Image (tube, rainbow, N blue to C red):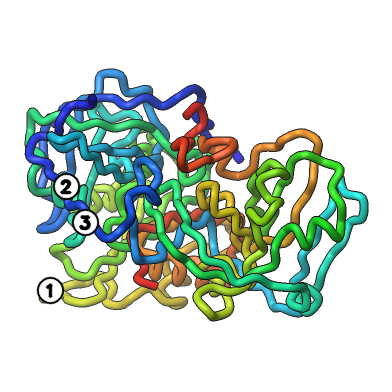
Amino acid sequence: MAGAAVLGRLNWQLAEVVEVLDETPRVRSLVLRCPGWPGHLAGQHVDVRLTAEDGYQAGRSYSIASAPEDEHLVLTVERLQEGEVSPYLVDVLRPGDKLELRGPIGGYFVWKESFGGPLLLLAGGSGIVPLRSILRHHAATQSSTAARLLYSSRSREEIIYRNELERLNASKNVDVFFTLTREWPEGWNGHRRRIDEELLREISWPPTERPLVYVCGPTAFVERAADLLVAIGHDPSRIKTERFGPTGT
Amino acid sequence: MPPVSRGFGGRRRPAADPSRIPPGQYATSDFPVLSAGPTPRIPLEQWSFAIRGAVKTPISWTWREFLSLPSDTFTVDIHCVTKWSKLDTVWMGVSLDVLLEATGATGKYVTAWSDGGYTTNIPLGDLTSGKAWIAHGYDGKPLEAEHGGPARLLVPHLYFWKSAKWVRGLELTQEEEPGFWEQNGYHIYGDPWREQRYSGD
């Protein structure tokens, strides 16, 4: 496995919130200054830890949204209604606050320019976050690898990084396709359904091109996308998946 | 003590017995799915489970042979490195004591291997004396593919990535050989009570 084995112990570090960006009504990006940050690979995540006044702690993992080349470390967090950590990160945290984190973590769901492609990225909801890191790395390295992103959201308002992704779509080597599953604004010219075989065949390279595929999103999205890709004939060993959130089963 | 997070009180869930939740974990009633790559789906007539490598007698069981072995129903707590713990999960499976007794072991370490290419490493001593099973049922039903069916390894006293989904066999070795996540930044042993999440912890 080509990857970044983590050597030595990952210590907790104190980052400072530089800026908080509204991405969608339920999603914010935390721009962090993290002086001891050892660097990361596109697609990795961090553990975040919160401590209450009485010492009680709660921790969760979040994908890194920024590219290794970016000045600041960025986490993009979706508020989960029943969540313990995400409502704090989205609603309470503000510039100047400190945040404990450790990472980077994970050597599997990562992409480096040297991995090549063609690169097929499939995102459902907040599953876009690590794929955005990959796309920013792709842009920062001026990669000649062809990349395509298919991003499924419920509505236009819930598309995270919409402006940035539209800009990327205009650049050479990158194509971005949106699909909305619940609400479509007037004049919407993207796709209008959950991902299915026809849509994947349309936006993907054929299996003979052996695209390197990264799928990230809620479990149902990932299961569906990965099953469809295998059924179409893509090599399972070229499909990397990362699942978000509870399943309720 | 770590710095206090301004304005954080926590949403503590009183339901779970704190003495059963390892450090850094929280109790969930969901059963989240985590796996690397597509879910393999193998027809049962093609399925087999093998124990090979440093053993006295390598053996492979077909699905039918496997199901004819004595199965236990057991209730355990499971702990995922992504921080959720799920208490009192009820499984059905064949104890590894039964399987290893049939083969006899000469190696000290085990690599479990699965459909889809996943591997994980575990010391042999962590799989014996009633500590591990090859599970084929969950909550009274056959184990779903999403959760590792038709059969998965279950080693509840270690982080859940050690409980390899879609398991097809065990390879016994004299030296410990790091598996998939163990080569990708995760701890070689993975004891949740010592919070051995990542290499170096």
At x 23% / y 57%, what residue is drawn? B14
- Residue A185 badge: 1
Give the vertical position of B57 relative to B68 (above or below). above
Query: How far apart, in angstroms, are the residues tagged by discs 1 and 3?
Result: 30 Å
In this rendered view, identify the residue nearer to me: B76 or A132.
B76
Q: Residues within 10 Å of mark 2 (few under 14, many from 20)?
A: some
Pointers 2 and 1 in contact (C-beta within 8 Å):
no
Q: Residues within 10 Å of mark 3 (few under 14, many from 20)?
A: few
Name the amino acid, label 3: Gly
Q: Looking at the image, can residue B67 be seen?
A: yes
Pointers 3 and 2 in contact (C-beta within 8 Å):
no
Name the amino acid, label 1: Pro
Indicate the secondary structure of the residue bearing disc 1: loop
Give percent across and percent down for residue B101: 83, 57
In this rendered view, identify the residue nearer to me: A11 or B15.
B15
Q: Earlier in the sequence, mark 1 or mark 3?
A: 3
**Residue B153 falls left or right of residue A26:** right
User: What residue would you read off at disc 2?
Assistant: B10
